[in-house]
Image (cartoon, helix red, strand yellow):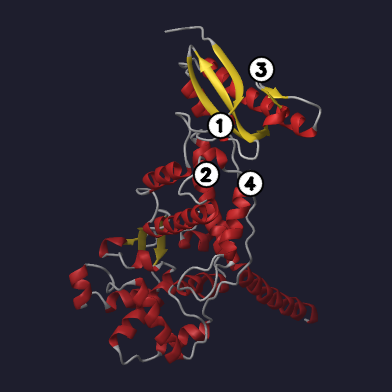
Amino acid sequence: MRTTNTFSILFWVDQKKAIFNYALIYARVSVNGKRVNISTKRKVHLEIWDTKKKKATGNSSEASQVNLYLDQVHSQIFQCYQDLIFKKKLVTAKLIKSNYVGEGENAKTLQNIIDYHAKKSESTLASGTIRNFLVTEKYIKRYLKRVFKTTDIYLNQLDYKFICDFEHFLHTYWPKGHPNGMSHNTVMKHIQRFRKMVTLAFHLEWIDKDPFIRWKPTFEKREREFLSANELSNIETYNFPIERLDRVRDLFIFSCYTGISYADIIVLTESNIVMGIDGFNWIITKRQKTKTPVKVPILDKAQELIAKYSNHPMTIVSETLFPVISNAKLNLYLKEIADACGIKKNLTFHIARHTFATTITLTNGVPIETVSKLLGHTRVATTQIYAKVIERKVSTDMLSLKKKLKFESEN
């Protein structure tokens, strides 16, 4: 292998394609007799170009700017040459050009990291999370097409401005078929997913710096809806003449008394019921979303519902604790249940999980650390979205304490 190279860089202008006496400047890179031309993407007036000195002449500001720009291009090309030598790679004119324009053998694109992340996640993320990433990927592609008029870009083109512009694009984009544009928190979720992919590229050393290093997400605080004890009682005691609504109500109530999500309830079988350390039945499963273990003691109301469907024709066929129904139909039927019970809230199945966290547990004095475990949260901070309920419980407890202290002082 050759250990020394003949290397040169010179600039020239394409006078034949000059327009209004302005011609494009090229850099000719030669290595061991082989050469390539690299467009500098800069034009110069032919009157100030010196073909012998290979630079602009005169004292005009245009000449100074052109020569300063060419010095920068020369330095960048020379740095590409030095990098190849430092890495002990074969030095060729073509490879220098590829590295200079961002098409080197190690250059990766945004689509490369999207594909790699998808492959890496298919066996580690829940199906719902994967679907969310697919939606984010769809918006990234639409942004590239609309703003950059392309389907892909190199990862080294990502910077803070790209992120800010993408965020603005999402804020102003109106998804087809949606009654409104995206909420601020939805936009933040898309940016966070995008960030996870780019951070993966950074850890893989596909990019030299993390473009998200200065970007900080900002979420608007939202109240988590849940049912009050009275609303929960209304649903529990209502007599539904339609069987499908009765089944959906039972699934909802079961979640209210266990905190288990729809995706996890629908796959529960008898094998998930295990005797706990207290001698009573517990449900032991894993959250599909995070693969976190969940261990929930079965309260009496939940046990009644399990018994109700133990020999149901639908559960015998599916071999599950409860009849299987799609999430879409479940939430659709919950609207009917809300209307029948006079509940004005937007009743969705996830409200059951919130109701368990608030009305069933925290309001009744269960410590937040215990509730966090029951919900399968990996961090207590996640459970603290129910802080207002805790504040209400603290207020009630303190009022009781005041009354007690007042009573003791009077006696």
Give the mark nearest the N terminus, 3 or 2: 3
Q: Residue furthest right?
A: 59
Depth order, front residue of 133/1: 1
Q: Amino acid at mark 1?
A: Lys
Q: Position of residue 89 (x, y in %)?
A: 47, 17
Give the mark nearest the N terminus, 3 or 1: 1
**Circle 1 sits on which residue?**
16
**Circle 3 sits on which residue?**
52
Say if residue 89 shows up in the picture. Answer: yes
Nearer the observer: mark 1 or 2; the answer is 1
**Circle 4 sits on which residue?**
160
Q: Residues within 10 Å of mark 2 (few under 14, many from 20)?
A: many
402 over 273 or under it: above or below: below
Q: Position of residue 134 (x, y in %)?
A: 42, 56
Q: Amino acid at mark 3?
A: Lys
Nearer the observer: mark 1 or 4; the answer is 1
